[in-house]
Amino acid sequence: MSAKTILKQIPGLQHLYGVLINYYNKRLYEKNPKLLANESYKRTYKHDIDWENPKDLNEKIIWMQFNTDTRLWSRLADKYLVRDYVCEKGEEKLLNKLYGRYNSADEIDFDSLPNQFVLKPNNASGKVILVKDKSELDVKKTRKILNKWLKSTFVYNNAELHYARIEPCLIAEEYLEEIGKTRLIDYKFYCFNGIPESIEVVTYRSSRIHYVEMNLYDMKWNLISNHIFYPIGTNVSKPKSFNEMVNACLNLAKDIPFVRVDFYEVNGKPYFGEMTFTPGFIFTKEYSEYLGSKLVINHLNKI
């Protein structure tokens, strides 16, 4: 087991590991954002990005970050502004309830919120506070965490430049829960010009360490998890609202070269999750190259 793995798995050292990584990433980003992007990519695929002739999905996405107009990415990756986009597309039925938007955690009136709700920043991934019982919430601690999140930026993660243009805020949303289940399943559709190609299904994630269980399915719901690196999750049945999710992808992702559109399902009803333009490095090199063949970039307007 590597020293890095040990650091990530010992609770007392997790915070220190995160601080060190963030500091290193920030310094590398400030020196040259391409260096950070390349290092993040190379960590998985063991070779440098081919900036002149990108082939696989992640290479092409990174190339697009530095060479094309990504203002739409910033708008739709914003967990608050994307709600307006979903409504503009006539898909407001997919949205959960929004209780409030705040520029600071100090603005949140917890007394006005229902007993159950979700708090999260609009410009990050994996940062969310699930409140199942408001009476048990440590409000002072919660405000401290949220205000800290507001000061951080996701741009230093893998040099995801479009996050730098998102104005940070906090949002409170409806707490989604399915009867008889302890957690919701994430259905993540990889879409090319609105056409979904495959679905990443996340059945479990741990907040204490970076551990995710997932499966990968094709559009006929055949299991193709041999194409991903992560531990295999529970094999699940096709969601009841699968066709509604697909139709929403065709609408929301139309004319967008690539975007991942995420959903949840609660008691047979689909709910919109988010739109992601820079997904993580989860695919084998061979499958990433296959997906890369679906992403045509030579016609895109360069900046």
Image (cartoon, rainbow, N blue to C red):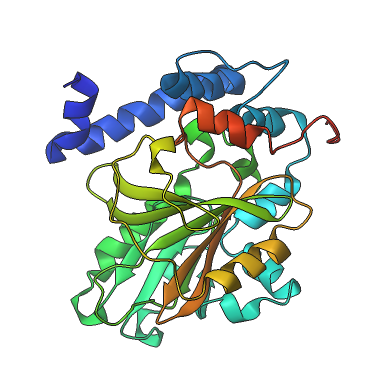
Where is residue 135, by image quadrant? bottom left
As drawn, is 256 to the left or to the right of 301? Answer: left
Where is residue 244, by image quadrant? bottom right
Residue 58 visible in rendering: no
Q: Position of residue 9 (x, y in %)?
A: 17, 36
| 275 to 89, vertically: above or below | above
Which quadrant: the N terminus? Answer: top left
The residue sitting at 44% across, 70% down in the picture is: 239
Front position in the image: 97 or 246: 246
Front position in the image: 76 or 268: 268
Q: Position of residue 30 (x, y in %)?
A: 56, 22
Front position in the image: 254 or 219: 219
Q: Position of residue 118 (x, y in %)?
A: 38, 71
| 121 to 243, vertically: above or below | above
Where is residue 224, by image quadrant? top left
| 161 to 119, vertically: above or below | above
As drawn, is 66 to the left or to the right of 224? Answer: right
Front position in the image: 85 or 286: 286
The residue sitting at 60% across, 20% down in the picture is: 34
Residue 224 visible in rendering: yes
The residue sitting at 27% across, 51% down in the picture is: 207
Which quadrant: the C terminus? Answer: top right
Total labels: the figure holds 0
Q: Position of residue 235 (x, y in %)?
A: 31, 57
